[in-house]
Structures are given as C-alpha cells and as structure tokens.
Image (cartoon, rainbow, N blue to C red):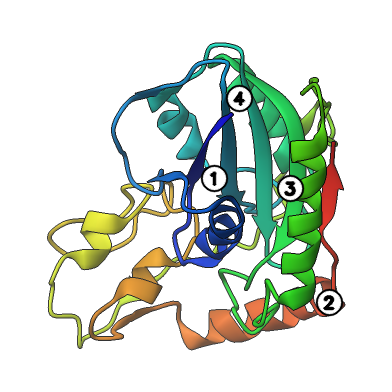
Amino acid sequence: MRKVIFYFSPCGGTKAVADIINKEYGDVLMQELTTPSMDVELDANTLAFFCFPVYGGRIPKPMYDRMKQVKGNKTPCVHVAVYGNRAVDDALLEMQELTNKYGFVTVGGCEMIAPHSVDPSFAADRPDASDVAKMKEFLKKLDEKETLNEVRMPGDPNYAKKKANDFPLYPKPSKECIGCGICYKYCPAGAINAKRMKTNKRKCISCMRCVSMCSTESRNVPLPMRVIAHAVLKKTCSDRKEPKFYL
C-alpha cells in the first residue's frame, strides 16, 4: 500500500515525529501543511498519516483550511498528535471528525511528545530513543493488520463547546527588527502585519514559528509573560508523559 505523510509543523517538533515514520518506511512522499500547499487527491489504496501539533488540547485552527486541499476516497489514515508534554485532550477526535468530512477513514492514532512550542525547555529532548522505539513497534503492528478497520479516537464529543486549555502568548518585534518579512511570509495563521510586523491577536495561534524563524532574533514574547508562562507550564508539563497508540 502506498503511503503519504502530511505534517503541520511550525517549529519542527511535529516534523521530527513525521521523519521517524518516513525513515521507517524508507522515504515516502511527504507534504507540508504548515503553509498552504497544492491540492491532493488520494484513493483507497493509499495510507495517509496526518501529523499535527496540539495547542490547548485542540488541533491548529489552520488545519481546517489545509484539509480543504486534501481529498480522500475512503482513504485509510492515521492521526499523529504531537504535544508539549501536557496533554492531547480532544485533538485526536477533532482531527478524526475533520478528516471524515474529506473522505478519510481513521484506522489508527498516536500521541507523541516534542518540545513545547511556548517554552521548549519542557520535553526538550523529545522524541527520544524510547519514543522512536515505541513508534516503530506501532508501525509494525499497523503493517501486520490484515484489515484496516475504523478506530474511534479518544476525546470529548463536545470539545467545540469547551474552553481550550491554552496559554496564548503573542510575539512582537523589538526595535532591532529589520522588517525582512520572514515572519509574515511563513506565519501559518496569517496573523502578522506585512508593514509593521505586528501580531493580530485574533488570528495568532501562539505556535511561535515567527520567533523560531526570525533571522535577527528580534521577535519574541515579552520577558514577563515568558516567566509567567514557564511557571504555569511547570505545573503540568514537568512530569514525563509517554506515547500512546490506538489501533
């Protein structure tokens, strides 16, 4: 069966997990969804992996637009939720329901850990060797299945009515900003003003891609907010979480 990997990875953590899958299968087709890409149509003889980060227990808002570019036809898929060592909450179920609308059938799911987007000091070394070994074991079991049947992902069906467990932080440019436009060009949510490089708080998903890509290191979240965020995240992100798999 042909395989394809889609990934939404603003800061590289989710891509690191996607690369594990890619390496295990031997360089399969990979398509990035972090920014808008080409339209794709897949048949029932293709197994699709959707790798995405978890923000506040939900999928990234831009995924709703990105999935309009990916069409399935009873195409089996596996959802790979990557989170910063807090929790996945309802993200897997949300992704399952979204992909169902575009012709996909969920046959498996994963919860993997990568550095937290807001404070990368949490889960800084993930995915590690143990995570990789567990992912490989999951992929082996997936390949050994004679029939790929639909699997219900965990989560609260009323997730849309719940308040997201996020800690929104909005990066801003400092006086050292040279206005190169990298942050504006590659923002997944289109939340940055092209002229002043300021952040639209209504659109920003706090993925920190603009911070990680800034060529002059002049874009960041104000220090007081970073200190508060670290203290809050320390309560929920300090203890090591382990990958989970669903087949």
Of callouts 3 and 2, the N-terminal one: 3
Seen in the picture, residue 147 relative to 139 is either above or below; the reply is: above
Closer to viewer: mark 3 or mark 2:
3
Disc 2 residue type? Lys
Residue 139's label in the rendered image is 3
Of callouts 1 and 3, the N-terminal one: 1
Q: Which residue is mark 4?
A: 98
Seen in the picture, residue 158 relative to 91 is either above or below; the reply is: above
Q: Are marks 4 and 2 in contact (CB under 8 Å)?
A: no
CA–CA distance in space, label 1 to label 3: 25 Å
Quadrant in which the N terminus is drawn: top right
Q: Counting other residues with Cα less than 10 Å from the Cα at mark 2, is it few (<14), some (14-19), or many (20 or more)?
A: few
Where disc 3 sits, the SS reads: helix
Where disc 2 sits, the SS reads: helix
Tell me: 127 left or right of 29. Answer: right
Q: Which residue is mark 2?
A: 235
Residue at the location (65% across, 82% down)? 124
